[in-house]
């Protein structure tokens, strides 16, 4: 295909039933655009990959990339970028569905707003309520004194995720489940930081956009359904992975004084959770060790030997 407008990029990991539904929604809802779909399979079980392979084999504008290791969200998407040719990259979780001409609406907005590099849609849950379309970057004042104090002193008064926006609006961080990028800007800022295995990639990439003087927007006319938790299981390993990523985010974007304050605030938060949450003690003990990166799920993955590498 030539002159591709949009490259949809998604990751499958033992969840082909979700991925198939996403692909169907992309094909049915995307109107009057040249697009391609790139699915990175992050070393799923043989049966799950076979199901996906059989479904996609006759879709001409789809590339199925078989990864030999579960490389996580950031690395998996960056692998997909290697095969992408679109003017725009639409990174979307495989447990999402497009509810309208989402890609066309987001593309049209970026076509007409050169100062914006990254947008997201209205992300809805099972009850059609706002899910997690946007949020705020971690702030020292917010962590210590609450959102109201932080907004009072902040020069950039971005909305919190508790505010339901009904018009196109600047936001600080977009949902990681639905990120629509100008491809050239995404490449210029180096794409996703592959040190992140899961979680906090959206905070990091949104911050990188702001740092080059471009804007991030929420576009409510575009709609996506997200079955939260459909692509990952929620357990203590996932929770610890979040904090490992969070520590990397703090170490990357804050000075020493700010990092100390944010980690002290987290210390007290997790200490009181010891008495309230099932996994509270285990998470607190991991924090006392500094949420070491060596405990990341990244280092628990096994390389799956394939008879041949598949790009379909």
Image (tube, rainbow, N blue to C red):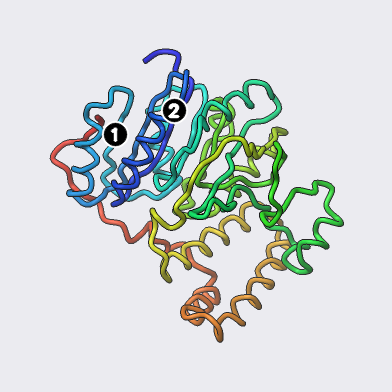
Q: Which residue is depicted at the point 66% across and 54% down?
A: 161
Q: Confirm whether residue 30 shows in the render.
A: yes
Q: Residues within 10 Å of mark 2 (few under 14, many from 20)?
A: many
Pointer 1 residue: 64
Numbered mark located on residue 219 in the image:
none
Numbered mark located on residue 7 in the image:
2
Q: Which residue is depicted at the point 60% across and 49% down?
A: 203
Farthest residue in the top direction?
2
SS assignment at label 2: strand
Q: Is residue 157 above or below residue 267?
A: above
Q: Which residue is depicted at the point 49% across and 52% down?
A: 196
Q: State which quarter of the image contains the N terminus.
A: top left
Q: Which residue is depicted at the point 45% across and 45% down?
A: 74
Q: Is residue 60 above or below residue 130?
A: above
Farthest residue in the left direction?
307
Q: Nearer the viewer, residue 72 or 16?
A: 16
SS assignment at label 1: strand
Image position, residue 292 (x, y; %)? 48, 66
Horizontal side, residue 159 vs residue 222: left or right: right
Q: State which quarter of the image contains the C terminus.
A: top left
Lower position in the chain sequence, tag 2 or tag 1: 2
Image position, residue 17 (x, y; %)? 29, 47
Q: Residues within 10 Å of mark 1 (few under 14, many from 20)?
A: many
CA separation in Å, label 2 and label 1:
13 Å
Q: Confirm whether residue 82 shows in the render.
A: no
Q: How many marks?
A: 2
Horizontal side, residue 153 vs residue 10: left or right: right
Farthest residue in the bottom direction?
275
Image position, residue 261 (x, y; %)? 72, 68
Q: Nearer the viewer, residue 16 or 259?
A: 16
Look at the numbered discs 2 and 1 and tell me whether their residues touch, using CB distance below 8 Å.
no
Q: Nearer the viewer, residue 13 or 32?
A: 32
């Amino acid at each position: 295909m030539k002159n591709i407008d949009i490259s949809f990029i998604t990751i499958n990991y033992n969840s082909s039933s979700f991925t198939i539904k996403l692909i169907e929604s992309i094909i049915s809802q995307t109107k009057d655009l040249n697009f391609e779909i790139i699915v990175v399979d992050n070393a799923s079980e043989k049966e799950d990959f076979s199901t996906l392979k059989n479904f996609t084999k006759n879709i001409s504008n789809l590339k199925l990339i078989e990864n030999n290791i579960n490389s996580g969200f950031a690395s998996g998407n960056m692998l997909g970028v290697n095969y992408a040719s679109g003017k725009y990259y639409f990174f979307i979780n495989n447990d999402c569905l497009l509810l309208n001409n989402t890609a066309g609406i987001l593309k049209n907005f970026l076509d007409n707003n050169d100062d914006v590099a990254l947008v997201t849609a209205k992300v809805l849950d099972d009850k059609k309520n706002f899910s997690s379309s946007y949020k705020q970057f971690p702030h020292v004042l917010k962590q210590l004194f609450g959102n109201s104090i932080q907004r009072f002193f902040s020069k950039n008064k971005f909305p919190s995720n508790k505010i339901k926006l009904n018009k196109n609006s600047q936001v600080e961080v977009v949902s990681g489940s639905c990120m629509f990028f100008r491809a050239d800007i995404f490449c210029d800022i180096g794409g996703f930081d592959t040190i992140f295995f899961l979680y906090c990639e959206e905070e990091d990439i949104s911050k990188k956009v702001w740092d080059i003087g471009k804007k991030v927007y929420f576009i409510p006319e575009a709609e996506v359904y997200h079955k939260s938790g459909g692509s990952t299981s929620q357990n203590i390993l996932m929770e610890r992975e979040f904090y490992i990523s969070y520590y990397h985010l703090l170490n990357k974007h804050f000075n020493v004084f700010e990092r100390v304050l944010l980690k002290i605030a987290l210390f007290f938060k997790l200490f009181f959770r010891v008495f309230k949450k099932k996994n509270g003690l285990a998470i607190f003990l991991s924090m006392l060790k500094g949420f070491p990166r060596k405990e990341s799920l990244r280092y628990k993955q096994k390389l799956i030997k394939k008879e041949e590498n598949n790009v379909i």
